[in-house]
Image (cartoon, rainbow, N blue to C red):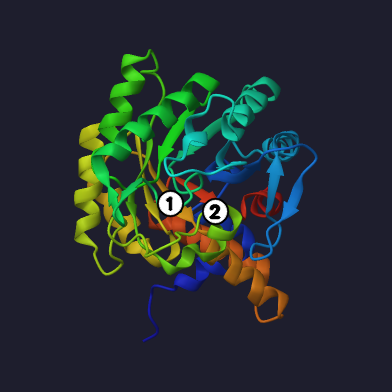
């Protein structure tokens, strides 16, 4: 006897498939990363990330206007300073590139959510995410610099700060300084489970942030570890995080799912540069259907439990979804 249940009945037409679709991807899900440099009229292509650029503040405003017009609610800013030093002093300079970009964006588009990456790696000569002494990245002295950076972003008008350094205790340190300086309303989106991934390669060209010695495995998470991510997330929530992030996304869908299942906070996931560039390269060679693969990847990240996705695909995906 033929089975009574025929799942294909609900797959027969696109209209029926749309009616029963479990995961809906929209432009509201996206946060678009932008790379800000000093100067004006600069829009420099990033060779390993086709379609992405290092942009001066005036160009960033133009790009953000286009992003906002597509229904994407937020951008996250990464800064490439004019000068680097051992302590990354331009990271917390009130006239730095990110601080200047925040002001310009909020003046131009008050409704655009401007998030800032809080880290030291783009600003230091050694390329590490904190204070270095005798070849070691020091945790507690770094917290003071992260506090100064986050506070400078809040003073410039940022809507949200996102510490990505993976120093222990940095969420509590940033929450404390923001609260004491009158910015208790500013949320923290913590890079809570950030893995020491090989998928970050293209980003390091984009942000000019490659470490000059060693690697970041002493502070970013070990890729084989799954349960440890829950510990990291729990600690950040205890310290005051409002949103928790898993990075990268595609190779860590199980971690995204675990975090979503175990914690009642919004979950972000970063669809990182290597994941983006692999799709671009394969599509250029004609090996894959770019748009279908892009949307399948983004849908899988949302299906795993992400409430928001940081992705370089945001404008292309938004155009297809609108």
Residue 184 at x, y = what percent? 36, 18
Which residue extends farthest top?
182
Q: Nearer the viewer, mark 1 or mark 2?
A: 1
Residue 219 at x, y = what percent? 29, 55
Q: Nearer the viewer, residue 296 or 35?
A: 35
Density class for disc 1 (Cα within 10 Å; few <14, some 14-19, many ≥20) is: many
Residue 303 at x, y = what percent? 43, 57
x 42%, y 59%: residue: 248
Residue with the mark numbered 2: 19
x 64%, y 66%: residue: 48
N-terminal of the two: label 1 or label 2?
2
Residue 56 at x, y = what percent? 71, 39
Q: Secondary structure at mark 1?
A: strand
Residue with the mark numbered 1: 269
Q: Nearer the viewer, residue 49 or 1?
A: 49
Q: Secondary structure at mark 2?
A: helix
Q: Is residue 308 visible?
A: yes
Q: Nearer the viewer, residue 38 or 54?
A: 38
Image quarter of the N terminus: bottom left
């Amino acid at each position: 006897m033929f089975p009574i249940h025929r799942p294909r009945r609900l797959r027969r037409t696109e209209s029926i498939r749309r009616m029963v679709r479990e995961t809906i991807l929209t432009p509201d899900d996206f946060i678009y990363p932008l790379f800000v440099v000093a100067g004006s009229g600069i829009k420099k292509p990033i060779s390993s990330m086709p379609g992405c650029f290092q942009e001066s503040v005036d160009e960033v405003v133009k790009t953000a206007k286009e992003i906002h017009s597509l229904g994407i609610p937020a951008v996250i800013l990464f800064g490439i300073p004019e000068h680097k030093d051992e302590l990354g002093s331009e990271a917390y300079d009130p006239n730095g590139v990110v601080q200047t970009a925040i002001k310009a964006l909020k003046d131009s588009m008050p409704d655009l959510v401007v998030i800032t990456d809080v880290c030291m790696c783009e600003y230091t000569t050694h390329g590490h995410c904190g204070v270095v002494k005798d070849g070691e990245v020091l945790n507690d002295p770094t917290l003071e610099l992260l506090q100064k950076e986050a506070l400078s972003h809040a003073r410039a008008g940022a809507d949200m700060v996102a510490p990505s350094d993976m120093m222990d205790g940095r969420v509590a340190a940033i929450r404390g300084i923001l609260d004491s300086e009158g910015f208790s309303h500013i949320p923290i989106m913590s890079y809570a489970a950030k893995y020491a991934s090989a998928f970050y390669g293209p980003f390091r060209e984009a942000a000019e942030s490659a470490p000059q010695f060693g690697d970041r495995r002493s502070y970013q998470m070990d890729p084989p570890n799954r349960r440890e991510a829950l510990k990291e997330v729990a600690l950040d929530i205890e310290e005051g995080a409002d949103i928790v992030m898993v990075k990268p996304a595609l190779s860590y869908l199980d971690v995204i799912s675990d975090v979503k299942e175990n914690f009642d906070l919004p979950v972000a996931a970063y669809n990182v540069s290597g994941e983006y560039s692999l799709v671009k390269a394969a599509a250029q060679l004609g090996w894959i259907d770019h748009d279908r693969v892009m949307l399948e990847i983004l849908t899988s990240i949302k299906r795993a439990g992400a409430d928001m996705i940081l992705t370089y695909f945001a404008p292309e995906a938004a155009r297809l979804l609108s």
